[in-house]
C-alpha cells in the first residue's frame, strides 16, 4: 500500500491521538509529518517559501502565519516523498474523517500508473458535476473536475506532482488549497474521487490556522475577491481542454 502521512503541529496532541486511533484499525503504514510552525522559521527560510508581493498580486489579502505554515507543511510532504523510493504518497491533514471506502480507494490508486497523474484529491464536494468520470472501485469514481474544489483535507500525490509543486510553488502567494485550483500554472494533472473518502472531521471546527479567529473582509477585499473569482472562472474555462481525463489514466492500468 502507498505510504500515508498526516500533517500535525507539535502542539496539537489531541488531533494526533485522534488521527492515530482512526488510522490504526485500517492496518495502513503511516507516519506523522511534523507540521511547519511559521514563527519558528528563520527569515531566510520564510523568504524562500513566501513572497508578500506575489501574495498581493494573486490573492485578496495577505496570508496569516497559519496559512503560510500550512503551505510550507504541504511542500515538506513533497520533499518527504521525493526523499523516499515510493511512487506516490497519501497526504492527510489532521482534522479529517475517513469513510469506509478509504482503503479500497487507496488500493485502486496504487494500481494506477503514476505517469498519468500528479494529484488525486480524496475530498470532493457533495454536488460535484465532473467533466468526465470512470469507475475506480465498485462504489467510487475517478473524475476530472469542472472546478477543482478547495480544501486540502487529503490527496494522493505522485513523484511528478511533488516535483512540480516544489518547482512552481516556491515561493507561494496564495493558500495551498487555492493554489491547487490554479492547476494550469504548474501544469498539474489533477483528478478526484467521488464520493469523497476523506471528509471534514470534528476537529476542523477549531482551526489550527486561525488561532485568533477568522476576520471580516473589508469592502475592498470583498471587491478584490469577486474580481479574482471572475478571473479564475474565465481562466479555468480557457484551460479546461488541457485537463487529464480518467480514461487516459485508467486505460494505462495493467490488466489482471
Image (spheres, rainbow, N blue to C red):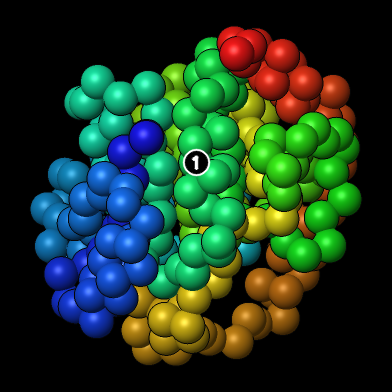
Residue 60, percent across and down?
62, 63
For label 1, the crowd category at 10 Å Cα-Cα, with few meaning under 14, some 14 to 19 and many 20 or more, is some
Residue 139, image x, y percentages: 72, 49
The secondary structure type at the circle numbered 1 is: helix
Q: Residue at x 49, y 63 (%)?
A: 98
Q: Which residue is mark 1?
A: 106
137 sits to left or right of 85: right
**Relative to residue 30, is residue 237 drawn left or right?**
right
Q: How many marks?
A: 1
Residue 61 versus residue 158 in the image, above or below = below
Residue sitting at x 72%, y 81%: 219
Name the spot of residue 1 as percent of width and height, x first. Answer: 37, 35
Residue 212 placement: quadrant = bottom left
Along the line of sight, the residue nearer the viewer: 17 or 91: 17
Q: Residue sitting at 21 percent across and 55 percent down?
A: 32
Quarter of the rendering occupied by the C terminus: top right
Which residue occupies 16% across, 44% down? 44
Provide residue 247's location: percent of width, then percent of height: 77, 21
Front residue of 242 and 38? 242
Q: Vertically, is 127 above or below 118? A: below
Question: Is residue 102 something one can see in this rendering?
Answer: yes
| Residue 130 horizontal side relative to residue 76, left or right | right
| Quarter location, residue 118 | top right
Q: Could you say which is closer to the camera, residue 6 or residue 113?
A: 113
Between 56 and 179, the residue placed more toward the observer is 179
User: Vertical placement of 98 versus 206: above or below?
Assistant: above
Asked if residue 62 shows in the view, the reply is no
Amino acid at each position: 500500500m502507498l505510504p500515508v502521512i498526516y500533517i500535525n503541529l507539535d502542539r496539537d496532541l489531541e488531533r494526533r491521538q485522534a488521527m492515530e486511533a482512526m488510522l490504526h484499525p485500517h492496518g495502513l503504514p503511516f507516519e506523522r509529518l511534523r507540521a511547519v510552525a511559521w514563527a519558528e522559521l528563520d527569515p531566510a527560510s520564510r523568504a524562500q517559501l513566501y513572497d508578500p508581493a506575489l501574495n498581493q498580486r494573486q490573492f485578496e489579502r495577505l496570508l496569516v502565519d497559519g496559512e503560510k505554515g500550512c503551505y510550507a507543511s504541504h511542500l515538506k510532504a513533497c520533499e518527504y516523498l521525493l526523499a523516499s523510493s515510493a511512487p506516490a504518497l497519501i497526504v492527510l491533514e489532521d482534522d479529517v474523517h475517513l469513510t469506509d471506502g478509504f482503503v479500497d480507494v487507496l488500493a485502486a490508486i496504487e494500481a494506477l500508473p503514476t505517469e498519468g497523474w500528479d494529484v488525486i484529491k480524496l475530498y470532493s464536494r457533495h454536488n460535484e458535476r465532473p467533466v468526465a468520470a470512470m469507475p475506480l472501485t465498485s462504489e467510487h469514481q475517478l473524475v476530472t473536475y469542472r472546478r477543482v474544489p478547495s480544501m486540502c483535507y487529503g490527496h494522493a500525490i505522485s513523484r511528478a506532482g511533488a516535483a512540480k509543486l516544489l518547482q512552481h510553488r516556491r515561493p507561494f502567494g496564495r493558500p495551498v488549497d487555492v493554489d491547487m485550483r490554479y492547476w494550469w500554472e504548474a501544469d498539474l494533472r489533477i483528478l478526484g474521487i467521488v464520493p469523497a473518502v476523506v471528509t471534514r472531521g470534528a476537529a476542523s471546527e477549531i482551526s489550527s490556522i486561525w488561532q485568533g479567529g477568522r476576520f471580516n473582509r473589508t469592502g475592498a477585499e470583498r471587491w478584490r475577491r469577486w474580481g479574482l473569482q471572475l478571473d479564475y472562472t474565465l481562466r479555468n474555462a480557457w484551460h479546461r481542454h488541457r485537463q487529464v481525463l480518467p480514461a487516459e489514466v485508467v486505460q494505462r492500468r495493467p490488466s489482471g
